[in-house]
Image: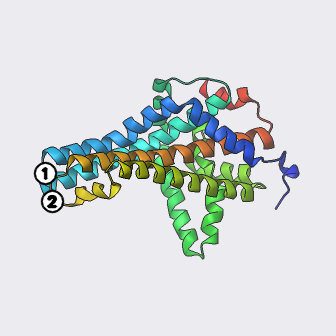
Amino acid sequence: MTTLEATGGAFELGRVMQRTFKVIGDNLGLFAISSLVLVALPVFAASVVGFLYPEPWVIGLAGVAGGIVAFVGSLMMQGVVVHSAISGLNGRSIQLGEALGVGARKALPLLWLGILQGICFVLGLILLVVPGLMLMTAWSVAAPVLVMEKRSVEASFGRSGDLTRGHRWSIFGLLVIYFVLAMIISAAVQGLAAAAGVTTAQSGFMTTTQAPSLVALAAVLISALSTAVQGVISAAGAAAIYYELRTGKEGAAPDQLAAVFD
């Protein structure tokens, strides 16, 4: 494996972490609204339909529809977070409408990218785990590449592999940290909900024939928000890693990174 110096500059984990949570803090309102509208509300709306019309077929149909809409919404949110994060690191503020527009345009390409990543990751895990983790790390910035550089899905994989080469152990460590932090935050949210008498286990009503309770509706909303928080951390982390690689390995200036939005 080539050294960090040979690839154009040191990859600093602390700096990437700091940037990750800086962009989340700077865009907290934008990310909160996006998460609520794109991920949490579709699931919650489906739950309300099941609450109002507690027929088994209605509950099942609403659950499937809500899940599909929330899944597409999560893809849009990924585009929103990446776009906003990179723009924020370039010192450019983003309006909600602009961010949602980027998310909408990139939803289908990100879906195809996610499908291919998932298939390859599962196949890699079947081959004794290590190949799957290697692919996950090599392709960790494929989504930011797709959003930022207007490349095809297939070209984004190759570009991500080129950018991450020489820094993959550091990137793998960051991915583990992000995963652990996301789990901790999710557990904290669910812990607070449990202290208030709401447990996310109650969201399982969508698979039953009984009408959901108001407490179960609250549990569904909390569970959806928890999932959205994990998605925000993951996307913001990928964007920060991408920014570090572009500026460190290629010496890309902020205006070059932002030029795609002009």
Residue 259 in picture, x, y percent from top left: 66, 27
Residue 138 in picture, x, y percent from top left: 67, 57
Camera-side residue of 7 and 32: 32
Residue at 18% x, 48% y is 50
Find numbered disc 2 in the image and state the secondary structure of the residue it sits on.
loop
Give the residue type at disc 2: Thr
Residue 181 in picture, x, y percent from top left: 57, 52
Camera-side residue of 250 and 155: 250
Residue at 85% x, 56% y is 3
In this figure, which colouring scheme has been used for the structure?
A: rainbow
Evaluate whether residue 145 shows in this view. Answer: no
Left-right relation of 216 to 102? left
Evaluate whether residue 66 shows in this view. Answer: yes
In this view, 2 is above or below 69 = below
Residue 123 in picture, x, y percent from top left: 54, 69
Give the residue type at disc 1: Pro
Give the quarter of the image for residue 84.
top right
Whichever of labels 2 and 1 marks the residue nearer the N terminus, that label is 1
Camera-side residue of 106 and 221: 221
- Category of crowding for the residue at label 1, using alpha-carbon neighbours closer than 10 angstroms: few (below 14), some (14–19), many (at least 20): some
In this view, 31 is above or below 72 = above
Q: Residue furthest bottom?
A: 128
Residue at 50% x, 63% y is 119
Left-right relation of 163 to 205? right
- Category of crowding for the residue at label 2, using alpha-carbon neighbours closer than 10 angstroms: few (below 14), some (14–19), many (at least 20): some
The answer to whether mark 2 and mark 1 are in CB contact below 8 A is yes
Name the disc covering residue 109, or none. none
Left-right relation of 64 to 150? left
Name the disc covering residue 209, or none. 2
Find numbered disc 1 in the image and state the secondary structure of the residue it sits on.
loop
Residue at the disc numbered 1: 54
Quadrant in the picture for the N terminus = bottom right
